[in-house]
């Protein structure tokens, strides 16, 4: 009885992975792209807030050490914004290259094909 219960728990836990296994490559890429597109604006807002915090801290700093710390925050904010926007652009390039739309579909005509034997 215990073995049947354990097997049913394992099978129930594996069902979502089996459903994912039937997804196409394009739908997986589309899902990842949609997730990144949803997260990127939040990350941009956080990086911009961090940058503005560094600017205010730099303006309010009275001595050189505090200005140095604030300057490093500003630089980190700019680097963070650059990285986030670059990733967003890279996702856009990947979407355009593979023909992935917002629905997560993949146009198979744009993928390279491998012909073996002579039957393509």
Image: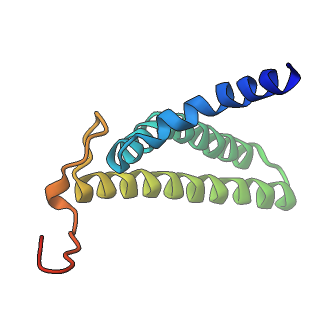
Q: Residue at x 39, y 48 (%)?
A: 29
Residue at image point 72% right, 23% down: 8
| Total marks in image | 0
Q: Residue at x 21, y 69 (%)?
A: 113
Q: Is residue 78 left or right of residue 105?
A: right
x, y percent for residue 89: 37, 55
In the picture as drawn, the residue positioned furthest to the bottom comes out as: 117
Residue 12 placement (x, y as % from top left): 66, 25
The image's colouring method is rainbow
- Asked if residue 41 shows in the view, the reply is no
Image-based side of 17 in relation to 4, left or right: left
Residue visible at 83% across and 61% down?
Answer: 64
Report x, y in % for residue 103. 28, 33
Q: Nearer the viewer, residue 23 or 39?
A: 23
| Nearest to the observer: residue 119 or residue 66 | 119
Q: Which one is in front, 31 or 5?
A: 5
80 left or right, relative to 102? right
The part of the image, by quadrant, that contains residue 111 is bottom left
Relative image position of residue 2 (x, y in whole percent): 87, 22
């Amino acid at each position: 009885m215990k073995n049947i219960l354990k097997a049913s728990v394992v099978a129930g836990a594996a069902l979502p992975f089996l459903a994912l296994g039937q997804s196409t490559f394009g739908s997986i890429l589309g899902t990842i792209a949609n997730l990144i597109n949803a997260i990127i604006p939040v990350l941009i807002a956080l990086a911009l807030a961090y940058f503005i915090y560094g600017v205010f801290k730099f303006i309010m700093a009275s001595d050189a050490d505090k200005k140095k710390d604030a300057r490093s925050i500003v630089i980190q904010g700019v680097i963070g914004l650059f990285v986030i926007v670059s990733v967003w652009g890279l996702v856009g390039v990947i979407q355009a290259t593979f023909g992935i739309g917002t629905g997560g579909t993949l146009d198979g005509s744009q993928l390279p094909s491998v012909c073996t034997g002579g039957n393509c």
